[in-house]
Amino acid sequence: MRYLYETHMHTCLASACGVSTGKEHVRFYKDQGYTGIIVTDHFFGGNTCVPRNLPWEERIDLFWRGYEDAAEEGQKVGLDVFFGYEQNFEHDEYLVYGLTKEYMKAHPEIEHWTRQEQLDEVHKAGGTVIQAHPFRMRDYMDIIRVGELFADGIEGANAGNYQMDDARAYAFGKQKGLLMTAGSDNHHSPAPMLFGVELEEKIGSAKDYAEIILRGGPIHIHVPEGRFEMPDWERDERHFAWHLKADETLEALEKGPWT
């Protein structure tokens, strides 16, 4: 038996780009047959809706509202809900799993961690880091930064990506032997397309999920058939131009680590 989990989603209570509340998400995922969800709102380096001028502990309380709203509804309807977050650096973003509210309140330096510090400190706390949508290319970006050195794995598939983005990520992950996950990057339920991971054991916390990642799986990617096939994308001139720009950045990635 396998258990289906959402690993990447946002609520309107903590992500400025979120549309649905945690409760709305929970009811939708329950109807779709998911075992559980991990709420990963945008942290303070990214598109958060938490005011930056408040005291640190108050900011953390506000940031956790999206997860807590979902968790309350999850208890009512029988859907497991866990906490994570997504941190942005220079348009390379990372999903962090396994930290508690108490830990975050006690460590305000989290907001200013480098990529390497984030990985090291999250590991010390028993958590894990996954790079989100590593080959996503958008018109506001000047370069793709594949942060494999600063994560325990990558999202091989993200429902918010173009298919080409996922085809590139999956091929890269297979070539490098990286652990890969999948998530919907869902901001609005009901959503037109959902991804996720299938686990061979039922988890009871985000730290349980982190432990599975840290031991190398098994994690089974839940995506539509054919998602990793290279699409006929040359007809889309804008997408073609973005990925030419992406190709030009890949050589730089081989020159060594960056922080």
Image (tube, rainbow, N blue to C red):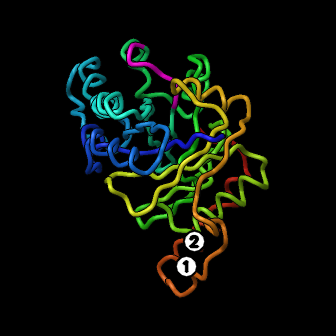
Q: Are marks 1 and 2 in contact (CB under 8 Å)?
A: yes
Q: Is residue 29 above or below residue 71?
A: below
- The foreground one among 198 and 114 is 198
Amino acid on which the number 2 mark rests in the picture: His
- The foreground one among 144 and 6 is 6
Quadrant of the rendered structure where residue 191 is? Answer: bottom left
x and y percentages locating residue 256 in the rendered image: 72, 45
- Give the class, few, some or many, for how many residues have Cα within 10 Å of label 2's Cα (few <14, many ≥20): some
Label 2, secondary structure: give it.
helix
Quadrant of the rendered structure where residue 88 is? Answer: top left
Residue 99 within the magenta-colored segment of the rendering: yes
The quarter of the picture where the C terminus appears is top right
Residue holding disc 2:
243
Give the residue displayed 35% in from the left and 32% down from the top. Answer: 74
Label 1, secondary structure: give it.
helix
Which residue is most to the bottom?
235
Give the residue displayed 52% in from the left and 27% down from the top. Answer: 206
- The foreground one among 67 and 33 is 33
Q: Which mark is residue 240?
A: 1
Q: Is residue 20 above or below residue 108?
A: below
The reply, left or right, for residue 186 in relation to residue 116 is left
> Looking at the image, how many numbered discs can be counted on the residues?
2
